[in-house]
Image (cartoon, grey):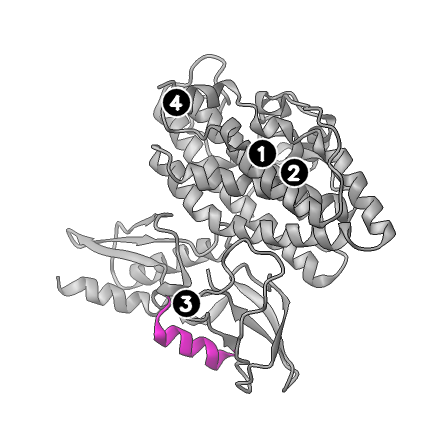
Amino acid sequence: MNARHLINYTLHLADNALVLGHRNSEWTGHGPILEQDIALSNIALDLIGQARYLYQYAARLMNAGPAGPGGPVAGVAGTPVTEDQLGYLRDSWDFRNCLLVEQANGDWGTTVMRQMLFSAWQYYFYRELQGSRDGELSAIAEKSLKEVTYHLRWSGEWVIRLGDGTEESHARMEKALDQLWIYTGELFLPADYEQSLAPLGIAVDVAQMQPLWAARVQEILKEATLVIPPSVAQKGGKQGRHTEQLGYLLAEMQFLQRAYPGCEW
Amino acid sequence: MESTKTIWSLLETVSDPEVPVLSVVDLGIVRDVRLVDGHPEIVITPTYSGCPAMDVIRMNIRMVLLEHGYTDIKLSTVLSPAWTTDWMSEKGKQQLKAYGIAPPTPVPIVCDLGLFQHNEAIACPHCGSYHTTRISEFGSTACKALYRCEDCREPFDYFKCH
């Protein structure tokens, strides 16, 4: 097995969770009502927790072997890579998250739509990954699945409530769906590291997972009286080619460690 | 084997900083305790992935063991099998209730994907009434949901099934 593929795969999953966790945390203190502010902050916390397990695992993998040329991250020469370096010191082309999670929050409707589309993916994804032959990934999947079940229920209910709500909320949800739908195709297009690890029983075959996701999402959108737009798949995030949104996010998230390297409190 | 017992009883004194009435043992997160050549090895599992209490708990476990003369303490974390509220002790559930937090119900009712499910019937920890309403599935910490009692009108936390 190619060690770099496993590192990249683990980083891809970690970046997905961290970037959406950070996006959601932007709502903390700004939610429409206190209870929903708390709900989204809790979801952010779950995602950042999942990201930490994955970054810790990626760091262990990187420290265990000689970093190949062009490897995913350069630690400070001679010192071990840490989870913090992976989150705070890589630049946007090193991030392997899908484009969907980095999209700006927009209004509340856009945020819950993004969450529903991604939680539905993460739900079926983690369900499969539990069977991975990589014990570490399988354990993280088992742990995370319980949390994602809450996320999908919560976001699904919001999409229905607003889609099938007032004229204005319906229009906003339709707009949110139009904006975000083009980023969902990428979730099912395997990157090279997935293509290499799926036949070994380590990575999930995401293409095969697509019908399960589609059935669940269509069910929710139908109940929300929303119409799915024609699909055009934007891709590249999993290979480090991002929309401009990610740069702004990293600039804020990484500011402190960039300005005050190694700062702790 | 004299001493894993001692360690277990020391762990009984380490509480969850967010729910101080509950020890880490009663919470069900201590998965294994071993002694190797007199040095403790403790395996714990997190409640929720992002629970910020875990780092504090790890530090407090270490502190209490150091205070009692143990050295070279090994603390490791396992994720599988994933923590469940089923592992909370009966004593822990009683203590939660006395503290004003409704303990998890023995049978998880709302743990699947169904949308807009009926609320679980949760008894108010203050007056015992089942005439309660869920305000939010997410509460002040990841492990709790927010409820209100329709009889005594008090809001309360419910330590939700997981």
Task: Provide residue A261's location: percent of width, then percent of height.
Answer: 58, 34
Chain to which mark 2 belongs: A
Which structural element holds mark 4?
loop
Q: Which mark is residue A88?
A: 1
Task: Look at the picture and state if A210 lies above or below A170.
Answer: above
Rounded to the nearest whole Å, what is the CA distance between mark 4 and mark 3?
Answer: 45 Å
Assess disc 1: are there few (<14), some (14-19) or many (≥20) residues with their C-alpha within 10 Å of its C-alpha.
Answer: some
- Please state the chain letter of the residue tagged with numbered disc 4 in the rendered image: A
Q: Identify residue for label 4.
A: A199
Magenta region includes residue A91: no
Above or below A184: residue B103: below
Bounds of the magenta span? Answer: B88-100
Q: In the rendering, at what x and y percent does residue A213 appear?
A: 57, 38
Q: Of helix, strand and loop, which one carries label 3?
A: strand
For the residues beneath circles 4 and 3, the answer to whether they share a chain is no
Q: CA distance from mark 2 to mark 3?
A: 32 Å
Question: Disc 2 marks which residue?
Answer: A253
